[in-house]
């Protein structure tokens, strides 16, 4: 019998790429949890498989509805759970803190409870569970306190947004259920990861979208930006989902927690310059700071130490930063070329 995986948030950037990876590299059935109103843009290429039930199944559930989660787990009984669903936009969390905390903290708790109850009812059921936290839990680390080797797993949490606070709760809940109930739960703090299908509320993706719209003559040659001095370490989303697969298949250790990230570090402004350099409009593009894009407080020294995860699994990032950025820009060029309309955010 084939193994069954469950991806919460399958319609998001990471969830959709993880579905691609599992369908291409395993013989597992892939069940994707999504809300009935979730946009299907990121999984449009998979809908034919889902319609044919060709190892791919969409399951309706909501992190804010306990009954739906209990029903989902009892129906699917997944061998592997990738909990990716979240309110994932840090800037939005400042204006919607309660929704962010409810979805990310209580939603994770509801999912863990659904899994715990299923395991309690069937002692032979022992799923391997990945809880996705975030590097944002480390927040705004003062330069003098940043470890020379990068942010390691034991660095103190100093969350700098309601989103980051919610991910601290998510992180701790994963470890709690492993320690309290013997569940095989691992938690990850993935640093910036991007590529095709990245939401346009994130800095590198809104840069790419604006450049594509400028090239198409849809907006003036001005790229609106926030804080360009913030330091980020980038990974490609396709490397990230390969890491998540290795997390649950390479000697999973209950209660462990890992930092995962890429190997290319630069300021956000350098990321913008890289994207602009790929455009034939590069000499005409003006960069304009938009106060609405600035966070009240920013997590601005995001450099990871990933030795723990790499030593345990052998994972290494493979896709260069330049390819990630080019593929992201090409993704937006294709969407703009199809005549889609976008908010200028």
Image: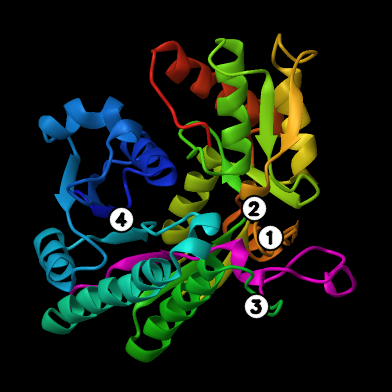
Dot 2 alpha-carbon crowd within 10 angstroms: few under 14, some 14 to 19, many 20 or more: many
Which of marks 3 and 2 precedes in the sequence?
Answer: 3
Q: Give the x, y percent position of residue 135.
A: 61, 63
Residue receiving disc 3: 157
Identify the residue position indicated by label 1 in the image. Answer: 306
Disc on the earlier residue, 2 or 1: 2
Cβ atoms under marks 2 and 3 closer than 8 Å = no
Horizontally, residue 332 falls left or right of residue 137, namely left
- Describe the element under mark 4 as helix, strand or loop: strand
For marks 4 and 1, give the CA distance: 25 Å
Residue hosting label 4 = 8
Q: Residues within 10 Å of mark 4 (few under 14, many from 20)?
A: many
| Image point (76%, 13%), residue name | 284
Q: Is residue 75 above or below residue 10?
A: below
At numbered mark 2, what does the secondary structure look like: helix, strand or loop? loop
Q: Is residue 77 left or right of residue 169?
A: left
Q: CA distance from mark 3 to mark 4?
A: 25 Å
Q: How is the image coloured?
A: rainbow
Disc 4 vs disc 1: Cβ atoms closer than 8 Å? Answer: no
Secondary structure that dominates the magenta span: loop
Residue tagged 2: 261
**Closer to the eye: label 3 or 1:** 3
Alpha carbon distance from label 2 to label 4: 21 Å
């Amino acid at each position: 019998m084939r193994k069954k995986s469950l991806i919460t948030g399958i319609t998001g950037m990471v969830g959709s790429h993880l579905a691609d990876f599992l369908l291409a590299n395993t013989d597992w059935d892939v069940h994707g949890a999504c809300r009935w109103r979730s946009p299907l843009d990121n999984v449009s290429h998979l809908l034919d498989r889902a319609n044919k039930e060709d190892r791919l199944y969409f399951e309706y559930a909501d992190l804010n509805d306990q009954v739906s989660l209990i029903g989902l787990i009892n129906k699917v009984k997944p061998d592997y759970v990738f909990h990716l669903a979240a309110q994932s936009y840090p800037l939005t969390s400042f204006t919607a803190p309660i929704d962010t905390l409810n979805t990310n903290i209580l939603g994770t708790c509801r999912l863990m409870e659904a899994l715990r109850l299923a395991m309690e009812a069937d002692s032979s059921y022992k799923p391997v569970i990945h809880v996705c936290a975030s590097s944002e839990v480390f927040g705004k680390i003062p330069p003098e306190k940043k470890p020379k080797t990068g942010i390691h797993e034991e660095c103190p949490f100093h969350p700098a947004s309601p989103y980051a606070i919610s991910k601290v709760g998510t992180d701790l809940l994963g470890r709690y259920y492993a320690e309290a109930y013997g569940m095989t739960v691992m938690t990850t703090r993935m640093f910036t990861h991007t590529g095709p299908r990245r939401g346009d509320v994130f800095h590198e993706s809104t840069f790419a979208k604006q450049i594509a719209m400028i090239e198409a003559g849809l907006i003036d040659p001005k790229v609106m930006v926030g804080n360009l001095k913030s330091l980020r370490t980038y990974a490609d989303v396709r490397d990230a989902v390969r890491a998540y697969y290795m997390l649950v298949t390479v000697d999973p250790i209950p209660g462990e927690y890992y930092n995962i990230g890429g190997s290319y570090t630069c300021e956000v402004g350098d990321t913008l310059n890289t994207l602009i350099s790929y455009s034939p409009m590069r000499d005409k593009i003006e960069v304009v700071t938009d106060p609405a894009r600035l966070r009240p407080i920013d997590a601005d020294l995001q450099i990871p130490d990933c030795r723990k995860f790499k030593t345990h699994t052998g994972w290494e990032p493979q896709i260069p930063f330049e390819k990630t950025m080019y593929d992201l820009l090409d993704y937006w060029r294709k969407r703009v070329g199809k005549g889609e309309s976008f908010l200028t955010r």
